[in-house]
Image (tube, rainbow, N blue to C red):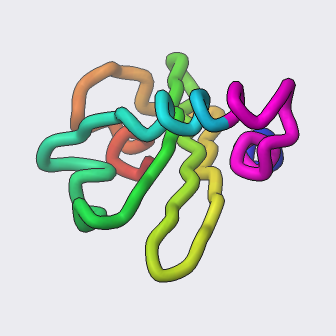
Amino acid sequence: MAALMRLIFKNKIIDGQTCERMLRLLGRQFCDEEALSQIPPNIFVADKNGAVDQSSNEVLYVNGHYTSIFCVCTKNNTATSWDRDNEAWIFT
């Protein structure tokens, strides 16, 4: 997932215009009081998260003082609820 995010950032998927649009769309995530809400508002973040019962994942492109791309993935989670106190939700 991090490699795919890097290709989007480098304008290497389809064409530059499409990559720029994908990055803008991924940058419109909103989190209030959790997750990305801890990142200062002047730092651009594009992210995509996803989850199924035993897996929770998130990939982020962060453009602040430095540019970073990272991905956090969990699997075989024993906590499979969709509540906010789910361990995988808290971790990602």
Q: Report if residue 16 lies within the magenta region.
A: yes
Q: Quadrant of residue 70?
A: bottom right
Which residue is farthest bottom? 65
In the picture provided, is 24 more to the left or to the right than 36? right
Magenta residues span: 5-19
Which residue is at a point 32% across and 20% down the rendered structure image?
82
Which residue is farthest left? 33
Q: Where residue 12 appears, x then y in whole percent?
A: 86, 40
In the picture provided, is 87 more to the left or to the right than 42? right
**Viewer-nearest residue: 17 or 4:** 17
Which residue is at a point 69% across and 30% down the rendered structure image?
17
46 versus 39 height, above or below: above
Q: Where residue 33 appears, x then y in whole percent?
A: 13, 48
In the picture provided, is 4 more to the left or to the right than 52? right
Which residue is at a point 55% across and 50% down the rendered structure image?
60
Q: Where residue 20 appears, x then y in whole percent?
A: 62, 37
Q: Where residue 88 appears, x then y in whole percent?
A: 44, 41
Which residue is at a point 70% across and 49% down the rendered structure image?
9
Q: Which quarter of the rendering shows the N terminus?
A: top right
Q: Report if residue 39 lies within the magenta region.
A: no
